Image: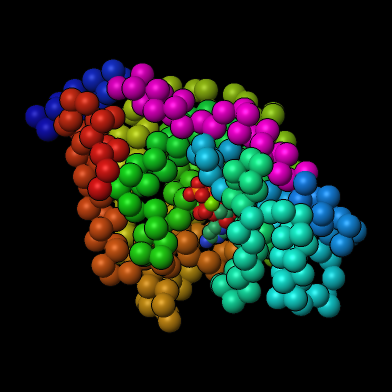
Amino acid sequence: RERKMYMACRNDIHRHDAPFIAVYKSLIPAEEELEKQRQLMAQLENLVAKEWPHAKLYLYGSCANSFGFPKSDIDVCLAIDDDDINKSDMLLKLADILESDNLQNVQALTRARVPIVKLMDPVTGISCDICINNVLAVVNTKLLRDYSRIDVRLRQLAFIVKHWAKSRRVNETYQGTLSSYAYVLMCIHFLQLRRPPILPCLQEMKPTYSVRVDNIRCSYFDDVDRLENFGSSNRETIAELVWGFFNYWAYAHDYANTVVSVRTGSILGKREKDWTRRVGNDRHLICIEDPFETSHDLGRVVDKFSIRVLREEFERAAEIMHQDRNPCAKLFEPY
Ligand code: CTP
Ligand code: MG
């Protein structure tokens, strides 16, 4: 009987596709916003080139990975191939340069975990953080963007999950919940494991792109135009996938023993990663492997209190998807 009810729910789920697609569409930034970002980026490139002719500027994070919301700040990485630079000095110098070009609220945070300069552009209203030589973030941004080009359902699912996480306040790493980056990886992984799969595992395919960053070899198949139809034999729609995603994290994921891995397109054991116990502040209560920095667990920010908050939110979302007549409204209700 339970199975029958379950199937009835699933068959009925399609009537929620249209509202979810509408939410997704409302979250996509407008072209003029992207144009403003490009404008600010060009200005910054100009300023930086004058002082450091060999430096390059890259966008990373949500403004470049295709999972950005409207009005998000932009993240910029200044890459300079010079072993002798002192990051703090360089950031202070950069702050001076930016200030004399009339950028506002310029602030060098040289002691942060990732040292940055913050600024606000009064012309476009965009805020921006600039860091130095965080090239791994530029490369993982490209990986996320390449995945998003394979099947539109990734972008749909990730926007909805991010919107849910922000509405429910479980997208706050300083409070022990997960980063947007972690949520997007969870979505990619989920779509890699659908049967038939909706996404391939790009890092297990023959590499067409390969760079070495901080002694880590980053390579994968990036010729994604050739994978346009990869997921087409799977006909699942967005409402089904949202349902499946929350159901997985609420009831099916083995938190005690497993690690989700986009790199291998599979579920790994905590044992093989040696993530079975707390080491320092890393508790490994929910394990999401970084695709390149494989010793990095994106769930390490989660502690014994926030894991409960997270799991309760996954369960709440799954229950809403199972039972609610209008899940789209309830799911994103502010916490
Ligand atoms: N990043 C990372 N390792 C982390 C967290 C973030 O490498 N533990 C990098 C990723 O390149 C990510 C970027 O920093 O794309 C920005 O992270 P985050 O703010 O979590 O994601 P955004 O995509 O910018 O999302 P939001 O819209 O919430 O700003
Ligand atoms: Mg960001």
Residue 101 x %, y %: 76, 54
Any magenta on residue 196? Answer: no
Main SS of the magenta part reads helix
Q: Residue furthest bottom?
A: 280
Is 265 displayed left or right of 160 in the figure? right
Residue in the foreground of this view, choosing between 220 and 160: 160
Residue 11 x %, y %: 25, 20
Residue at (37% x, 32% y) in the render: 241
For residue 105, say whether it is visible. Answer: yes
Residue at (26% x, 30% y) in the render: 329
Is 20 displayed left or right of 199 in the figure? left
Residue at (39% x, 40% y) in the render: 163
Residue range highlighted in magenta:
16-42
Quarter-wise, where is residue 158 in the image?
top left
**Above or below, 204 relative to 233:** below
Residue 316 x %, y %: 21, 45
Any magenta on residue 39? Answer: yes
**Picture quadrant of ligand 1:** bottom right
Residue in the foreground of this view, choosing between 15 and 117: 117
Question: On the rendered image, what quadrant is the N terminus found in?
Answer: top left
Quarter-wise, where is residue 42 in the image?
top right
Is 162 displayed left or right of 121 in the figure? left
Residue at (22% x, 26% y) in the render: 326
**Above or below, 36 relative to 313:** above
For residue 192, say whether it is visible. Answer: no
